[in-house]
Image: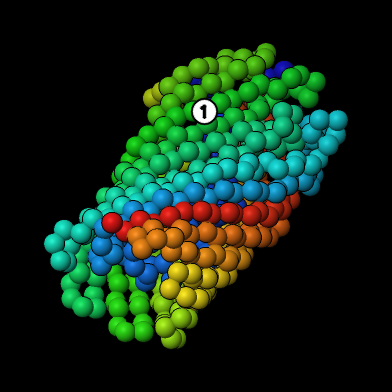
Amino acid sequence: MSVSKTPVGGLRLAVSAAALMAVATPSLAESFFLKEQSVRGAGRAYSGETADTGVSSLWWNPASIARSGREVYVGLHGLLLDSGVDNAGSTITYPGGTTVPVTGPLGTGHEGDPIESGLVPNFAVAMPVGDRFALGLSVAAPYNFTTKYEPGSFTRYDALTSELRSANVGLTAAYRVNDWLDVGAGVDVQYVEAFLSSSLPNLSPLLPDGRSTLEGDGIDYGWNVGAQVHTGAWDFGLSYRSEIEHELDGQIGISGLLGPIAGGNVASDGTATFTTPWFASASVRYAVNERLTLNGQVNRAGWSKFDAIRVRYGTTGNEIRQDYKDVTGGSLGVDYVANDRVTFRGGVAYDPTPTRDTERTARIPDGDRWLYSAGTSIKATDTITVDAALTYISLKDADISSDRTLYAGTAAATTSSLRGRADGEGIAASLGARWAF
């Protein structure tokens, strides 16, 4: 097979763009966002969070600490996931028009458990300053997951390993305006690091694959605001968390390309920018009596901000469309106070996926999901409360469809057409404690 000569610089740009086709990693949460930010909230499927008071609701509404007093919260969520991705006719088309199937080792077309289980920690503290003012500090991991496919997987030209780690430090100020109105605002300092790898085809199915890797990290900033209204039996809450534009600085590595495309092998500095979504939440809590409280919440996520990944490599750039859509989800739940020491909770939530059926990749094999939760709080002492929750996550089967042109703009242009089907379910076990001091 022969390929006409192309400039090495252009070929390297085409190869690096292929290596950076995705920067996000999936989870059994809303795309690559982890909802597990409060153990108490997990027990009622995160319903009523923006209207509830106390430090464990700080992620959902900065106004929540306006009347909480001195309080510390720690939580840990363990995610045990069962997922699978099946081949549904993936192919690759080489220069000259030769199309062959893409299968796994020994012709297999199933990948079991590509989404790895893991742990998600949270921490928050609130301190009153005078009678009406409070300051808060929180640490969370809103984007934190890993997917891995076997070497030689049918997904290999789209994804092999995808790792995303994040740490969000939030600084919050809240003010009790009067007996019924609280307001709050905060700034977020968010660190993100990522590692991505995939295979790159050489120009014949008889040749071994090359390999691409990207690793990078960066720190960027956002903000959040919120308000709460408390009127006897009713509590209302509104909050907004801004999008954050991330720029990851790191290394791009391309190796194993042979023959006419060997000039694409490179190890170089590079950057990738992308924007995480904004989140808006509205919730209500109604105390039916002294024991029973009903909760409801609606969440709107601005995933259309994740419209593209913009890559810089040397003096040139490339834009890779993602085309996510804004989505609206919601949850309903209850709190039941059994006695002075024990409270029980339950809830159900619906989270639609922001990915589109025609543009879903193996890095983010995401689908609509339902959450079914139960939890409890036990007042161990007069100042320490222990929270626990268990959530079942059901992921709707989702089609994977991703067409990529590798080495675009050169005579070596090769088209990968990934077709698959993803399914999954999981259990989230959460344990935390609140200390009023």
Q: Give amino acid for label 1.
A: Leu
Vertical comparison of 220 with 177: above or below: above
Residue closest to the far right = 106
Tell me the residue at 76%/22% (across/down): 204
Residue 434 placement, left or right of 42: left
Q: Quadrant of the N terminus?
A: top right
Percent x, y of residue 385: 42, 60
Q: Nearer the viewer, residue 153 or 347?
A: 347
Q: How is the image coloured?
A: rainbow
Residue 280 placement, left or right of 336: left
Percent x, y of residue 51: 37, 71
Vertical comparison of 429 with 201: above or below: below
User: Residue 397's image quarter?
Assistant: bottom right
Tell me the residue at 50%/43% (across/down): 144
Q: Which residue was labeled with disc 1? A: 214
Q: How many marks?
A: 1
Observer able to see residue 301: no
Percent x, y of residue 159: 63, 36
Observer able to see residue 233: yes
Tell me the residue at 52%/59% (across/down): 388
Q: Quadrant of the C terminus?
A: bottom left
Percent x, y of residue 389: 55, 60
SS state under label 1: strand
